[in-house]
Amino acid sequence: MKPARSAPALLLLAAVCCLASGCVPWNREPPRPGATAIGSKPVIVPAQLRGNLLIVEAKWDSYGPYHFLIDTGSSATLLTPDLAMRYAARGYPPPAVPVVRVKSAAGATTVLPATTVERLQLGSVRFEAVPVLIYDCADLSAQLGVKIDGILGFPLFRETVLTLDYPNQRVILRAGRPAVPLPGETIAFNNQNRIPLIPVRLGDRPCTALIDSGEDAALSLNPARLKPRFAFGPTAGPTVGTLTGDRQLEVGRLGEDLAIGGYVVPRPVAELTDGLSTLGGGILKQFTLTFDQEHNDVTFWRDSFDPIAIPSMRSAGLSFRKTPAYWRVVGVIAGSPAAAASIEPGDLVVRVNGEPVAGWDLRRYDELIATAVSVEYTFLNGSTETRQRLRIADVVP
């Protein structure tokens, strides 16, 4: 990763992330598979980082490979309609999950239907009779630049020990805790419900955070009781997408350190939320994390206890929703170079630095914004193309 991280200008459906903050609550027994078939040896599944999200690849039939986002912050598993229909289990009643209403990219609201699929498979690990919600991942696929076939929620892995190995871009599944103790620091969940909520410290104050591998940002913080101190901000930030619609973030750099066990993140950049505080991919990608739901704990490991630096958040002030043909502006940060250039939500971008946007995905665009002094955007108005070169500035230094 480059020395500075851009604001998430390509609009992520952040983490399906609203699932963790209330759409599908954790205050009841979450849906989980009817059975998990796993051998005695560890199973290694290849993965890749897209932005700060770990995407696993699996192939068990002639239609694959399939790509899944593993979302430890979600209490439900979501599958695309095609995959859900292909493996729909006959004779099972719909799983008992609450109604989830989703707002599409066009603004229409729909309800996610529930079903049960006969199986899902990661490597040789087979999950049978899996309760799922049916969700079209097209927007998320467009943002990440790879077809996403589903989002795998934390309860799916109830009968496995799950390792997310960010540095080596892989996922490891085991039948139980290894005989040899894992290196690193093991932290117990602060509940008995197998929810990956862990105690952390902000400055000299204890608090609780959800480990959310489906969240692209480093840290989302609910300030209600913590009353955090800021070295910069909070200020208006980028626009992100959730299942219930778009929202503009408030962002800032904290004036105090975050401690996860013995690991320290000095003065991290934080997004403010009114939901659960979360540790997202911007921090998690520094670690190999092993979740053991039977023992209700998680082990953090990295090869150094050196402080984890969270770089500045940079942007021209634009947030986009990506399609193959164009990017639609969905948010403009007040006071940014984009605002000064009178760019408005709804404007269409067809080229970046002269290249059609079809050649740009989240990772490549982030890498450009991280180091660029300026970027040329080509806007489309009817049949007329207009080029605008915008300065890239620190939203949060």
Image: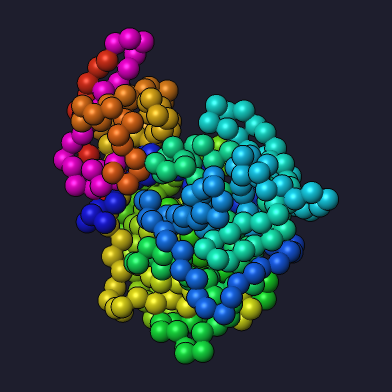
Above or below, 236 against 268 in this view is above
Q: Residue at x 47, y 42 (%)?
A: 147
Q: Residue at x 38, y 22 (%)?
A: 347
Q: Residue furthest left?
A: 373
Above or below, 184 against 126 in this view is below
Quadrant showing the N terminus: bottom left
In the image, residue 272 lies at what x, y percent? Answer: 47, 53
Drawn side of residue 77 relative to residue 338, left or right: right
Q: How many marks?
A: 0
| Relative depth, front residue between 314 and 147 | 147
| Relative depth, front residue between 231 and 322 | 322
Drawn side of residue 110 relative to residue 351, left or right: right
Magenta stretch, residue numbers? 365-384
In the image, residue 329 lies at what x, y percent? Answer: 39, 28
**Residue 390 in which image quadrant:** top left
**Residue 288 in which image quadrant:** bottom left
In the image, residue 22 lies at what x, y percent? Answer: 65, 52
| Relative depth, front residue between 227 and 126 | 126
Q: Residue at x 30, y 34 (%)?
A: 359
Drawn side of residue 294 relative to residue 174, left or right: right
Q: Is residue 376 magenta?
A: yes
